[in-house]
Image (cartoon, rainbow, N blue to C red):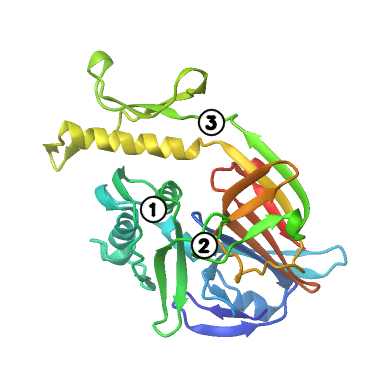
Amino acid sequence: MELYIYNKALALQNVMDTYGSLRWVRRYSECGEFELHCPFTVENILLLAQDNVIRKNDSDEVGYIEYRNIKKDEEGKENLIVKGKLGEGYLNRRIIWGTEILNTTYELAMRALVDKNCINPTDSDRIIETLILGDLGNFAGNVNFQVSYQNLLKTIEALCMEAELGNRVRFDKSLKKLKFEIFQGLDRTSSQTVNPQCIFSKEFDNILDQEYTDSIMDFKNVVLVGGIGEDADRRLVTVGSGTGMDRFEVFNDQKGLSNMVNNVAMTEAEYNALLASKGNETLTDTKKVQTFENGINLNSNLRYKMDFDLGDIVTCLSRKWGIAIDSRINEIEEVYEEKGMEVNIVFGKEMPRTIAQKIKLL
């Protein structure tokens, strides 16, 4: 795997084809990361400078260097370890400057936040020169959203998780620009016929082992959101539903969520919609957990980036256990070493990372 190294202005510096290992982690709704190990040389330390950009020759994804470390291995050889974020991480360098109230689609809301804080901000010092907006996907789903002075990347990630959308930054070689865009994986489940189906099952000989988890330990389905006001005058909105033992309640304190826009008070309906949006965020973070953990045989009918890819929804099936679930591929880790390439997959956005579903492609 050749690595193209650019400076932060995206001018090509050199091509690197000799290194110990590369770990490249792609994530659907959150920012990805990478880690590169290579021999320490003067050429490598100069080439792999902080903020330089790395691109694999088989992809338009990029990462930028944030961390460098030199240390000796067990044999006394000096190695250079380089770490960084994928292109979405540039958004981590910005906050949302001021208060934004957005009542539009999730996609347009996120594009507006990136545009106002990275591409066309009022303060020209805040411009990220290499960043532009990519193509519009016109994805459905509306949001009524208020945010002030929050980290831009964390806000984009939260909106993506709520809308089940992905965000990425891709390198446009012809323009020498980085394109921010929202995308959506394909539905490859067994219940649809539009796209080729992707089913992980021992019955299809593409699974080597299998583990199932079903948990409601952190599950909530009713959120009471508290806004401005005190005691009996406090504004309250309930989001979600459930009765009896099937009702799991939680409180979301939004006392700091203002009902004023440019010194003009919102209507009661407008403010309640904002409170409801905060409740929906809570429900997104407290879903039921239902996961399969599978070991995949790559010498079977499933091919990475052809039969399944980041963001796709696939089916995991065990007829013996009487279980079938549809789950989204949320993370893909590519590992390149001398012995070859290894791919590890995590899917299911509703899963905490401590019990995240992992698929190791063997």
The residue where tag 2 is placed is: 193
The Cα–Cα distance between marks 2 and 1, rounded to whole angstroms, is 38 Å
Mark closer to the observer (1, 3): 3
Q: In the picture shown, does residue 7 fall above or below 163?
A: below
Q: Which residue does the image show at 29% across and 28% down from the upper left?
A: 227
On residue 152, the disc is: 1
Which amino acid is tagged 1? Answer: Leu
On residue 136, the disc is: none
Q: In the picture shown, does residue 115 fall above or below 175?
A: above
Classify residue 295 as left or right of residue 258: right
Which is more N-terminal, label 1 or label 2? 1
Mark closer to the observer (3, 2): 2
Classify residue 306 as left or right of residue 209: left
Which amino acid is tagged 3? Answer: Phe
Q: Is residue 229 visible?
A: yes
Residue 104: image x %, image y %?
26, 52
Classify residue 148 as left or right of residue 82: left
The Cα–Cα distance between marks 1 and 3, rounded to whole angstroms, is 27 Å
In this view, the residue in front, 132 or 81, is 132
Dividing the picture into quarters, in which one does residue 345 lie?
bottom right
In this view, the residue in front, 3 or 331, is 331
Residue 69: image x %, image y %?
67, 63
Give neighbour class at mark 2: few <14, some 14-19, many 20+ (Cα, 10 Å).
Answer: few
The quadrant in which the N terminus is found is bottom right
Give neighbour class at mark 1: few <14, some 14-19, many 20+ (Cα, 10 Å).
Answer: many
The quadrant in which the C terminus is found is bottom right
SS type, badge 3: loop
The residue where tag 3 is placed is: 219
Residue 304: image x %, image y %?
64, 68
- Report the number of discs: 3
Mark closer to the observer (2, 1): 2
